[in-house]
Amino acid sequence: MNFDPRYSTRNFASVGTRPIRPDGVDKVTGRARYGADFNMAGQLVGRVLRSPHAHATIRKIDTSKAEKLPGVKAVITAADLPDLTDGDAAMYDILDNCMARTKALYDGHAVAAVAAVDVRTARQALKLIEVDYELLPHVTDVDEAMKHSAPLINDAIFTEGLEEKPVKPSNVTKRSQFGHGDVHQGFGHADFIVERSFKTEQTHQGYIEPHACVASVSSDGTADLWVCTQGHFVYRQHCAQLLGMEASKLRVTSSEIGGGFGGKTHVWAEPVALALSRKAGRPVKLVMTRDEVFRASGPTSATSIDVKIGARKDGTITAAEATLRYSCGPYPGSWAEIGAMTAFACYRLENVKTVGYEVLVNRPKTAAYRAPSAPMAAFAVESAVDELAKEIGMDPVDFRIKNAAQEGTRSSYGPVYGPIGIGPTLEAVKNHPHMKAPLGKNQGRGMACGFWFNFGGQTCTDLNIGMDGSVSLAVGTVDVGGSRASLSLVAAEELGIAYEQVKAIVADTSSLGYNDMTDGSRGTFSSSMATISAARNAIKILRERAAQMWDIAVDDVVWEQGHAVAKGEKHGNLGKLSLKEIAAASGTTGGPIAGHSELVADGAGVSFATHICDIEVDPETGATRVLRYTVVQDAGKAVHPTYVEGQYQGGAAQGIGWALNEEYIYGKDGRLQNPGFLDYRIPVCSDLPMIDTQILEIPNPNHPYGVRGVGETSIVPPLAAIANAVSNAAGVRMAHIPMSPPRILAAIEAERAG
Amino acid sequence: MRYIRPLSIEDAVGLLAGSTGTAAILAGGSDLLVRMKGGFVEPDLIVDIKAIEALSEIRETADGFSIGAAVPCAVLGESTALKKAWPGVVEAAKLIGSKQVQGRCTITGNLCNASPAADSVPALVAAGARASVVGPGGRRTIPVGSVPTGPGKTSLAKGEIIEAILLDKRAPRSGDAYLRFIPRTEMDIAVVSAGVNLTLDERGVVTAARVALGAAAPTVLLVEEAAEAIIGRTLDEAALERLAKVCFGACRPIDDKRGTIEFRRKVAGVLAKRAATTAYARAGGK
């Protein structure tokens, strides 16, 4: 069954319409089941004890008092999660992050856990666990951590990627480099050069639903896990490996998800819940508090970035260079590397060089956050690009259009682009009424571009046709943004039936082959490809059944608009057979009808966006108000335009929060000062204007319908677009995110003072 | 943990006075329940005062207004007379938390929580409000400003309950206003705030004024020098600048996650100016 994923033009019947989502009513009425809504008979309450110290050796943990407390059924420490990772360093880090082994590496690091009959008992038990810590010096700032004098977080780590193998351990785990040409020579040809340093503070994905799961390990060694996740198959692999189970014996069912944004692609509490259940012999429910979510899950990197860009008088960029330092938390990562890849991806550059440094700090393990690492790099680059345009005296949009990457451009990170959307989004912005709208006093406008790779990956889908002609579609990618609706549209499109005839579900790990998780904007891209393939396989069987019903050759049967049609002169008087009619007869023509698909969805088309933002700054207080916001982004093909718009708006909303107020604030003691939504300030409804969207459709040549991922790119431009707007409104370049009122006021005052 | 809902203020006082261990008063619960949920407090006794009828009323008396300790802030906004007389106090109460929180929270609770950043307190202090306190020794009336003594601490003795907040009857040509600075538009805690209450003569000259600052010191600050800066003047530019300067100097704020010392000082002055301008207009000044 050869599946051809190449794009071909077609007229769509279902794709591109906006029906109501199948999960909508349950979600707005409270009937939908999220992670914490699952319960089992006899279940215990799990609670985790966390280090209050940023960096400390764990000398001893005494759990005896907690174990004796009536109602406590299990207490675990790292000893109950022995190291079975067999030299897999990344898995070992995940294990150590789930339960600290010899050292607590950040405020919030799990050190022990209990399962008890109720919350009160569990809480009491935590208080009875005695941990003997030896405090170590800590470092939480990315620049401080790079200094030679900084406390070492892991003395077994030597910087990778250096020309000479280092002799001393370092908090810098890796250096990576991208680019081509000769930047030194390029800067020599420049008439104008902008060079500036930027900082961004650490932010959390801020999903409304905290991590939650119920784990039930049976005495026969099989186990079930119900969990809020972006990737239940990956959770199965990781949990099974960490607990020494065969993956097939662990069945993971994903719940509805109240936001993930990359933060639910990593296991945190799940192996702990399984270990508690294994020890207690009863199901254990573990729900993180908001405090725990902030201190021990999520966040993205804090960064420190230097950018240098040079251009000729005519606006041609001659060279571009960036050094990017990203915090990883206490374990190695590749966050700066991704930042270094994306930094200049929007531009056609002869000479470009980016260098990334991964930096360990005593903060929670950095996790993916929507187009991870790209927003910070874009903030630095797009701020410098804006400044350079100003120095040259060019309109910022025209300057970007002149230097925008095109089909055939060799990207700054290596590959040569196919058809891409950066030019069209810039042209759309140039012609958008927003760009021409008048601005008032203390108001400024900014715009910026953004890029994201998009991923594809392993995908498996089942499409079953019921005897009543209804279609059930089982997918293995968790629905985080309306993909069940989109995939139902795709199945309806391919089969030629009504959307309402299709019902999509997310199948558990025992019901379907392996699927990569919903990350990299792959959910709808890859599962739609698999759905098209599965539907085409089902159509083949439908044609065979019709041929059998008519007693003609299958080659004479074609599928048109939901019907088998007999082709050729001799069949001229045969009426069409509907999917429903063929399905109704299936019991006597060979049994159930289904289509299956398993594939690796290659060719995820890269995605570009350009955003425009108007901001008003109160020059006396530094307060900001977002007046107007417009997102223009290439979707390839918008399967369900409402949810594409929702992704555009959601990314912009998160970007606005990140740009203006969100940040992890650490005290001198290395403790997080604001682990809650009161002082970790995500925007509330009234902080945001209606976010306007414009969908462009430049088909992805590697998808039958031209679909590209849309979920992540929308968070890439906002930091820069807002920084450019604030800088224009306040009359001073803002180089530190978030641009909180105290930072803006201080910058204005410094500018006034000269 | 015991939860009791007495029907009279005397019973409430008796329960609190006779309690061993930690006791807490529950009105709206918007501070207490959050602290309990977070594991910061675990009271042995909770006395819910919402069933005491008199505490749930706003009474207009010959002297002014008496706002019962269990009256939710949202109800303050529904009292036309109170809004007309003390718009600054009402707008402060209506800034606490969110709409949902305002349906539960009370200004007495806001006062007794003793946060330096409490929204209604600077407005009440500017208004010269008093608290009627009932305790084992009887009733007493004290200035609102003397209730909080430091973050989380009050001057109330064991067994004492504030039964009502008292506001005076308004002199003609009077107005008040409250402003706070938050980085967001709502659902936030004041980084710094200012309440201004003033009375004008027929020519628009300020004859009496009270200026209070919030989140600028461990407790609410009544800045007499700031009042002096505008008394005897129409609220001209020079008077406003002087007001801002005095407020800047009077602040004793801290650097914390919500703002810096420098920022709080500057914005305290800006807010005092803006609140004074609004209060002046409400008093009929032009």
Image (cartoon, grey):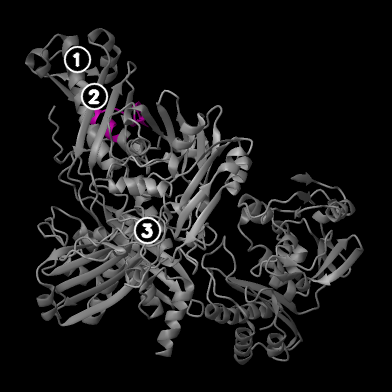
Q: Where's residue A612, x and y in %?
A: 33, 65
Magenta includes A498?
A: yes
Q: Nearer the viewer, mark 3 or mark 2?
A: 3
Secondary structure type for disc 1? helix
The circle drawn on residue A329 is 3
Task: Identify residue type, mark 2.
Answer: Gly
Q: Residue at x 14, y 40 (%)?
A: A8
Q: Nearer the viewer, residue A138 or A643?
A: A138
Q: Where's residue B75, x and y in %?
A: 73, 57
Chain letter for the residue marked with disc 2 in the picture: A
* Quadrant position of the C terminus of chain A in the picture: bottom left
Secondary structure type for disc 2? strand
Q: Residue at x 76, y 65 (%)?
A: B82
- The residue at which mark 1 appears reads as A546
Earlier in the chain: of badge 3 and badge 2, it is 3
- The residue at which mark 2 appears reads as A595
**In this rendering, position of residue A654 left or right of residue B270:** left
Range of residues picked out in magenta: A489-509
Q: Nearer the viewer, residue A248 or A427?
A: A248
